[in-house]
Image (cartoon, rainbow, N blue to C red):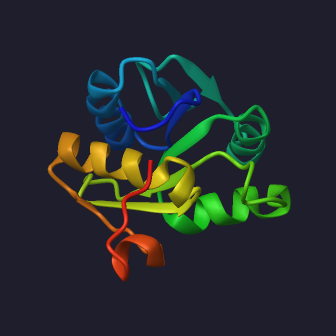
Amino acid sequence: MGVETPIAIIALTAAGGKLAQQIQRGLPDAQVHGLSGRVEDCDTTFTDTGKALRALFHDGYAIIGICAAGILIRGLGTSLSNKHIEPPVIAISPDGANIVPLLGGHHGANRLARDIATLTNGIAALTTAGETIFGGRTR
């Protein structure tokens, strides 16, 4: 499904952890990364969200953040340099209703967002002109 790079699902709350596990069932190669002390039953825990996001991003992971888009933007802002080589980054509302590709729309994020929307019965909020205006599909 979706992306050919490794996938990390980031959960910051217990509810986010449950949604992450639901998504992981549909994306079995994905790893759930949970905030220590808040998220149980995850593959990996972390204590510093920004540091964890930047490390995963630099290692080429597609990041699915079950959190506000602003957390991902602020956490990764200093790491952004070349949209042609950066991995996908997606924000998901804690209820799974809204899936927003923030980075890498043409490099798998749009497709991954659609796949996640199917898993959560949510909406993939695609904003790339190639799809929204010109009707093209991305990989």
Camera-nearest residue between 34 and 54? 54
Place of residue 9 in the rendered image (x, y in percent of width and height, measured from the top left): 48, 35
Task: Pick out the residue farthest to the bottom.
Answer: 133
**66 up-or-down from 135: above or below:** above
Number of numbered discs visible in the structure rendering: 0
At a point 45% along the width and 73% down the height, the residue shown is 130
Q: In this view, does 122 lie to the left or right of 86?
A: left
**46 up-or-down from 65: above or below:** above
Q: In this view, does 60 lie to the left or right of 120?
A: right
**91 up-or-down from 116: above or below:** below
Residue 66 visible in the picture? no
Q: In this view, does 4 lie to the left or right of 59?
A: left
Q: In which quarter of the image is the N terminus?
A: top left
At a point 56% along the width and 43% down the height, the residue shown is 63
Task: Pick out the residue farthest to the left.
Answer: 121
Camera-nearest residue between 112 and 131? 131
Place of residue 107 in the rendered image (x, y in percent of width and height, measured from the top left): 56, 50
At a point 46% along the width and 24% down the height, the residue shown is 30
At a point 38% along the width and 34% down the height, the residue shown is 17
Place of residue 96 in the rendered image (x, y in percent of width and height, measured from the top left): 27, 52
Residue 47 visible in the picture? yes
**5 up-or-down from 48: above or below:** above
Place of residue 119 in the rendered image (x, y in percent of width and height, measured from the top left): 21, 40
Q: In which image quadrant can residue 19 be found?
A: top left
